Structure formats: structure tokens, C-alpha cells
Amino acid sequence: MSASSLLLSPLNIRGVTFPNRVVLSPLCMYSANCGVATDWQFAHLSTFARGGVGLVFAEATAVEPRGRITPRCLGIWTDEQAEALKPVTRFIKSMGSVPGLQIAHAGRKASASPPWDGGKPLPVGDTSWGDPAWSIVGPSAVPLADGWQTPHALSEAEIADLVTTFADSARRAVTAGFKALEIHGAHGYLIHSFLSPLSNQRNDAYGGDLQGRMRFALEVTEAVRAAWPPDLPLFFRLSAVDGKGWEIEESVTLSRELKARGVDVIDCSAGGITGAPAFRVKDDGTPAASGDRPLGFQVPYAEQIRREAEVKTMAVGRIVGAQQAEDILIAGRADLIAIGRELMYNPFWTLHAAETLEADEAQANWPEQYRWSIVRRADLNQQSRP
Ligand SMILES: Cc1cc2nc3c(=O)[nH]c(=O)nc-3n(C[C@H](O)[C@H](O)[C@H](O)COP(=O)(O)O)c2cc1C
């Protein structure tokens, strides 16, 4: 897209060129069948590629069956699951966009119902959502909240197996055709639950001080980086603050360590360790009420991590306007803009943003199947506004 807008201009990371800096934030769809993508994933993700999004991230995709949030979450622990994602990546590439995958393990937040059913913990064996609900795992035997299962505290041998499992998923992501990969280290899921002193009460090498609590995240990152091709970018999503003992200073330290291990972009989200909505830190450093989410509420985290850890960052969270996104980039507060709900609301957000920012006067960025008639529509609308 045109270089007159930073948002719409390309960005190179390793051997990949993103055609612009708009990213579809990973969005769970709870529509897979035994972890295998269905027509829904194709229809959903292809829409954003048609809409000109530079990097289309598929949803949190479990590295093992126990790592799904719900029985209907996507997985990549089998070759069949990787195969089912090939049409998705092929189509996204055909539109000039980059297909990305987020690999995840839900840890003590696993085995729940979809959000439209309240996101409730399911009793082990419950089959209301397909596969029977399962026993969950975590760093310590500390449940998320009342009514949730008490997780099995993973042994060191089981942790080592999971590190390998993450790497195996990264290899399958290559086979499936993805060109960017993100490790989900946020929102209270397994990796975040190791980072947090609230959920990690271990007294072995994987707990205790910050170094111990970061160990699992760093081992996963090293294993994934070794399995993921050196010419392809690796992202890490963290909860920059969680309001329960994990603060921005720890995120800066973690980001430096991740960068040293080959992470290219830190995706700066927040919250989730208690299951409550994301937190925001006020100017005085205290967490703001969870409902208090102004536009761009997490951008300060992307800005601080970018500056202090000297790493590329992706900003996310209530970025809704073209000029808002452009201003974040121009001010050097982030390198990429991830958008979730606004893109679901308007999958052609990027193409409209290009018009707003006057970066696409000839509608050159529309798919050719649409462009010729979109141009005519624009001409007609010029002549007589509807
Ligand atoms: C329906 C839905 C599903 C989501 N699924 C994921 C997910 O799979 N992985 C993840 O890291 N975040 C997930 N999120 C969080 C989004 O990626 C994003 O960070 C959040 O919605 C804030 O961005 P927004 O204000 O642009 O929507 C989800 C959010 C929504 C609304």
C-alpha cells in the first residue's frame, strides 16, 4: 500500500514483508471439531485477508488437547489439524497478506464452555460442547476462582514434555503454511500462570523469584525459536500488567530476555490472571477499574516496552480509528497495530483506513474481483450522494 501512510506502508521482519502494519489480533472462534479447523475458520480468516489486513493471526491454537480453553477450540497437536489449516494459509497468501498462528496452552483456564455460554468451568467428562471436558494443569494446585477445578501441579518432567510439545506445534505450523508465529504468554493461560506469583507457588527451579517464574516462558521460547525457521518472525503476547503482582517492570525484563532468544515482536496485552477483564494501570501506578478501558488503553505498555527493552512492539486494545492507529505509529509508540473487535465489526477496516488516510485513492488495494466495481461505485457516489 502507499507509503504516504505509515500504517499502510510495508514492514520487513526477518525474511517476511508485511504489506502494511494492520494485524488481525488472535480471536478464538470456538468452532473447531476435535481441534480441527472447520469451514468457519476458512470463512472467518479469509474475510480479513480480502479486507487487506497485513498479518492475519489465527486464534489461540492449543498445543495439546488439555491446552484448549473449550472443547471447541482449535488445535495443532496432530498432522490432520495442520492439514486442515492449509487452505486458510493458502488463501491468505493469495491475497498478499501474511498468515500467522498463535500457539497456546490454556492451563488452569482450560476445559470451559464458550463465552456465549458464560465461559463456565465444565465438570470433567461433560460432553455438552463435544469432546468430554478434561482435568486441567498448572504451575501449582491453585484454582482460578471458586467453582473452577484445582489444577494438577505439573512435575518438572511434565514441564519438559510441554516445552517439546510447543516446539512440535511450531513445526506443524510451518507445514500448515504459516509465516508468522506467536506464543501466547498472556491472559492467565499456562505461560502467564507460571510468570505470576499468584498462580505460581512452586519452590523449585520454575517458581520463586522472577528468574524462576520466567523459566518456563523462556524455555518454551528457546524451543519454539529452534523449531521455527530463522527467516520467519516470532511474536510473544504478554500481559504487560495483571494487577496481581506482575507489573510493567517485570514485562520489560521478560521482553529483554525474549528478544535475546530471538523474539521479534512483543504483543502487549494485559490482565486475565484472575479471569477478570484486563487491567489498566493509572498514572499513579495503581490498577484502574476493569471496566475503565479508554481508547488505546494498552498502548502505554507497547510504548514503554519498545523504549526500555529496545524491541519491536505491537499495540492492541480499543484501537478503532485509522488516524488513531497512524498516530500511534508516527509517535513511535509501537511498530504494529493489532485490532480485534473493530475488525470483526468491519472486516474491510484496512481498506477504509487507506481511504481515510488518503493512501489508496484509486482503490488499488481492493481485491481485483471487487476493485473494478468499487471504483464505479465511488464515481457514482461522487455524482449523486445516496
Ligand atoms: C471474540 C474474542 C476472541 C479472542 N480470542 C483471543 C485469542 O485467541 N488469543 C488472544 O491472545 N486474545 C484473544 N482475544 C483478545 C483480542 O486478541 C484482543 O487483544 C482484544 O479483543 C483487545 O483488542 P480490541 O479492542 O481491538 O478487540 C479475543 C478477544 C475477543 C473479543
Image (cartoon, rainbow, N blue to C red):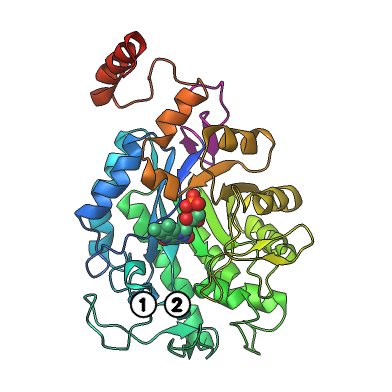
**Residue sitting nearer the eye, 165 or 282:** 282
Q: Nearer the viewer, residue 309 or 275?
A: 275
* Residue 102 appears in the figure: no
Q: Residue at x 29, y 12 (%)?
A: 380
Q: Does residue 17 sit above or below 383 in this rendering?
A: below
**94 is higher (above) or lower (below) than 154:** above
In this rendering, position of residue 93 left or right of residue 142: left
Q: Is residue 70 visible?
A: yes
Q: Main secondary structure of the magenta part?
A: loop
In the rendered structure, find residue 109 and report the number of the disc placed on it: 2
Task: Tell me how many marks there are.
Answer: 2
Magenta segment boundaries in residue numbering: 1-20
Q: Is mark 1 within 8 Å of ligand 1?
A: no
Q: Are marks 2 and 1 in contact (CB under 8 Å)?
A: yes
Judging by the rendered image, the residue that carries numbered circle 1 is 112
Q: Position of residue 192 (x, y in %)?
A: 56, 71
The image quadrant in which ligand 1 is located: bottom left
Q: Position of residue 262 (x, y in %)?
A: 59, 54
Residue type (three-letter) at the residue carrying disc 1? Ala
Q: 190 left or right of 171?
A: right
| SS assignment at label 1 | loop
Amino acid type at circle 2 is Lys
Query: In the rendered view, would you say 157 is above or below 372?
Result: below
